[in-house]
Image: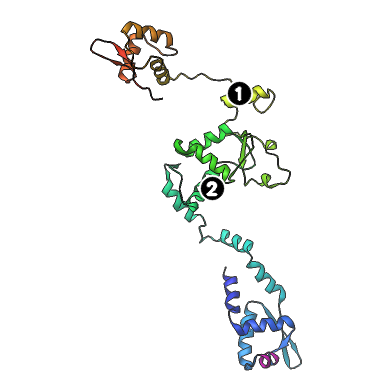
Amino acid sequence: MQDILEFLSVLADSTRLKIVGLLAQQPRSGDELAAILAAKAPTISHHIARLEEVGLVSAEAQQYYKIYALNAVALGDYVDALTPAHLARRVDLDDTIDANAYAAMILARWLKDDRLQGIPRKLQHQRAVYTWLTSKFAQNVRYDSDQVGEIVEQWCHPNFCTELIRRLVDGQYLGRLADGSWYWRADSPIAQQADFEARALPIAQSPDPLTYSATRATARKLDPAGDYAQLKPKVHVPDPDRERKLMAFRLKRGQRYTAQEIDAHIERYRGDLEGDAAAIREQLLSEALLFADDDRLYWRDEINF
């Protein structure tokens, strides 16, 4: 930046700026410049020396005079250095400037253990948060809806995931096909091309797009030889907590049952639960999925999944 600062400092003088303008018309001697500007020769010499320091003026001896000429190439280089693109590049390369400092300050307010805890109301804060979340997606690949959900859930509180996905799409941080089947980073270089076709992008491999999900299984039924032709089989993972909740939920709320009726109900719906019916009944009681009165009649209240 120092060269630009010196250039601007030299031009930040009305006399020197006039000299540059006069030399842009044609080369001139120091006496001619002094006469035109109604200035003394030493004053003109001083200003010429400053312009020579930054390479804007060159001198050529002709007989008894020095003829000064504008270095148009040097002036053009300085003008180019003041374009937005060039200044932006200079800032990027400047080790003393952290362009992400403000975004980092905002994220520090909204992240806890590297997970987003809410959606800001201020637009500047929203942009910082959405940009941060978009960075979790790779460029030039496509994601199905399950992959997008898995990524967002990894970095955000579950209460805000669905809303955040919608906002990333509405804000054009993520592109999405009209049928909602595929997503991609809107700033991907390939996505900027005129003939861009989202389905031509390779499928992102993280999270694994071949892990079974109902959405992917449905897509495979519609196109058996398509993207999900090699979809992994559905893996049954026992979930004892959910099994116990479902078992209690199948009882009529508020109705009284004997121990024998409860045990018969358990045997019918036990699924993957281990242990005898009496042990499972006691576990239902301990988890407040089942209640018993003094007459050892059982009932269930509301079940929260």
Q: Position of residue 224 (x, y in %)?
A: 68, 22
Can residue 111 be seen in this snapshot?
A: yes
Task: Locate residue 287: give its quadrant.
Answer: top left
Residue 72 x %, y %: 72, 75
Q: Kindly indicate the quadrant of the structure image that contains residue 223.
A: top right
Residue under label 2, please give it: 131
Give the position of the C terminus as an image quadrant.
top left
Quadrant where the N terminus is found in the figure: bottom right
Three-letter amino acid code at disc 1?
A: Ala
Residue at image coords 32%, 15%:
299
Specify whether 256 is left or right of 118: left
Residue at 44% x, 36% y: name it.
159
Question: The residue tagged with tag 2: helix, strand or loop?
Answer: helix
Q: Which residues are magenta?
A: 32-36
Work out whether residue 135 can be spotted.
no
**Location of mark 1 (residue):** 217
Rendering coords of residue 267 (x, y %) = 40, 8
